[in-house]
Amino acid sequence: MDFSKNNVYLTVKDYSVSGEEFQLLLDEQLQLLKTHPQPAPEKLGSYYESDDYISHTDGKRSIFEKLYHTVKQKALRDKINLIQQFQPKKGKILDIGAGTGDFLVIAAKNDWKTVGLEPSAKAKAIAQSKGVDFVQALSEMQDQSVDVITMWHVLEHVPDVEAQITELKRIVKPDGVIIIAVPNFKSYDAQYYGKHWAAYDVPRHLWHFSKTAIKMLFEKKQMELIKIMPMKFDSFYVSLLSEKYKTGKMSFVKGFLTGLRSNLKAARNSEYSSHIYILKHAKN
């Protein structure tokens, strides 16, 4: 990776917790952005200490949270259908960044063996109360021991992306599938909101991916990108939150219209707000 401190793509504020500003540095070859400076590992956890960090809570206090959790239930069903499309033989799923465990709960109900990894003690405790099993670290996982690895909006949080991909390749079976979902900074809503785009979410998001970045990073580790799929709901969710960051208030109408415009433009240029990437071991 080649990130020059002179190649600043954007300066972005942490709207959720600290109010601090961070630079996004561009690697032009990979079309990958890096948050700079990246917090030290011992400090990173403090940036997640907010009741508004929605993936670490089952809270339904506001209309926004209720809407999020309603959409989430449909998204969970869609994720199971997607997995079974690319891995019809039901085996073992490892969900990295399992949050409050809802995805693994529904996977278990669909006859998958499940295990999760989650750094947040709060989220993990909620998941364990639902019967979800966890490992403490990827190093505990045996080589070629799982059929499916999922990372739903998690890879952007990982300090060492290349080391993470190496571990994913080690753990997944030769005929297994890796499913990665990440935001896309090339989308219309990212361009429209600029420094207010909620999916930058600095410094919790350490990396900001394009389709080029995912393809090239995994190819370096002899992993093949076999399919890219849109996450059409994300443009609405992100646009609503971006409106709040930009104007100080939640404008449902404007956020919805921007999200819709983003999806319509993406129908032509294939640059959705977020993408799901399906990856397998490269064929020799």
Image (cartoon, grey):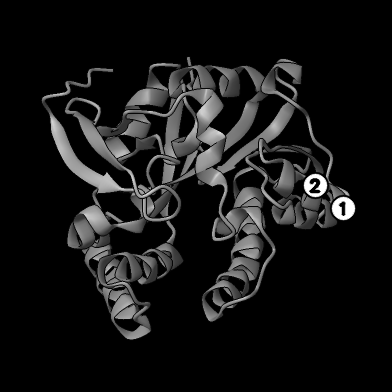
Q: Secondary structure at mark 2?
A: helix
- Is 15 rendered above or below residue 169? below
Q: Which residue is mark 2?
A: 125
Label 2, label 1: how far apart the Cα atoms are:
6 Å
Residue drawn at 65 percent across, 61 percent down: 76
- The residue furthest bottom is 253
Amino acid type of the residue that numbered disc 2 sits on in the rendered structure:
Ala
Residue drawn at 40 percent across, 34 percent down: 206
Q: Nearer the viewer, residue 39 or 160?
A: 39
Q: Quadrant of residue 2?
A: top left
Total marks in image: 2
Label 1 crowd bin: few (<14), some (14–19), many (20+), radius 10 Å? few
Q: Position of residue 268 (x, y in %)?
A: 21, 63
Q: Position of residue 97 (x, y in %)?
A: 63, 40
Q: Position of residue 39 (x, y in %)?
A: 42, 29
- The residue furthest left is 6
Q: Position of residue 14 (x, y in %)?
A: 36, 49
201 on left or right of 89: left
Q: Are marks 2 and 1 in contact (CB under 8 Å)?
A: yes
Amino acid type of the residue that numbered disc 1 sits on in the rendered structure:
Ser
Q: Nearer the viewer, residue 93 or 191?
A: 191
- Is 194 rendered above or below residue 262? above
Q: Is residue 269 visible?
A: no
Q: Nearer the viewer, residue 247 or 86?
A: 247
Q: Secondary structure at mark 1?
A: helix
Q: Quadrant of residue 20?
A: top left
Q: Which residue is mark 1?
A: 129
